[in-house]
Image (cartoon, grey):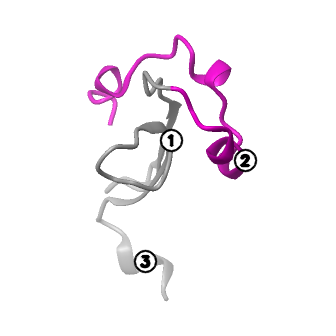
């Protein structure tokens, strides 16, 4: 694929880490956006998110994020404007 093929477009990759695998009940603990804007500038936004529930040890084994890591960093609603 040519490097110029996507020039002039905003291209984003989006990643989430959560408290588990059930989209109906589990919560976001980290988000990341990476890509490039229409002018070619880099986009790199990432943040931990306090899910307001305990992160299960089995999930911490997957992504390495603990309750202590997210304590006091704000809930998802506090990060929406940045996204």
Q: Is residue 16 above or below residue 80?
A: below
Residue at 29% across / 65% down in the picture?
8
Q: In this orientation, which residue lies closer to the viewer: 24 or 32?
A: 24
Residue at 51% across / 16% down in the picture?
73
Q: Position of residue 62 (x, y in %)?
A: 68, 52
Q: In this orientation, which residue lies closer to the viewer: 38 or 15?
A: 15
Left/right of residue 22 with respect to residue 8 in the rendered view: right
Q: Position of residue 37 (x, y in %)?
A: 36, 53
Position of the C terminus, as image quadrant, is top left
Circles 3, 1 touching at the beta carbon (< 8 Å): no
Q: Position of residue 44 (x, y in %)?
A: 51, 43
Q: Nearer the viewer, mark 3 or mark 2?
A: 2
The residue beneath circle 2 is 61
Q: Nearer the viewer, mark 3 or mark 1?
A: 1
Q: Earlier in the sequence, mark 3 or mark 1?
A: 3
Q: CA distance from mark 1 to mark 2?
A: 11 Å
Q: Which residues are magenta?
A: 54-83
Residue 80, quarter of picture: top left
Q: CA distance from mark 3 to mark 1?
A: 38 Å
Left/right of residue 68 with respect to residue 42 in the rendered view: right
Q: CA distance from mark 3 to mark 2?
A: 39 Å
The residue beneath circle 1 is 19
* Count of all numbered marks drawn on residues in the image: 3
User: Farthest residue toward the bottom?
Assistant: 1
Reply yes or no: does residue 66 show up in magenta: yes
Residue 27, quarter of picture: top left
């Amino acid at each position: 694929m040519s490097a110029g093929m996507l020039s002039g477009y905003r291209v984003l990759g989006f990643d989430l880490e959560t408290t588990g695998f059930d989209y109906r009940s589990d919560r976001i603990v980290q988000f990341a956006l990476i890509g490039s804007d229409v002018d070619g500038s880099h986009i790199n936004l990432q943040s931990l998110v306090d899910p307001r529930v305990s992160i299960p040890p089995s999930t911490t084994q997957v992504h390495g994020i603990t309750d202590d890591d997210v304590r006091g960093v704000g809930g998802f609603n506090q990060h929406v404007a940045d996204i």
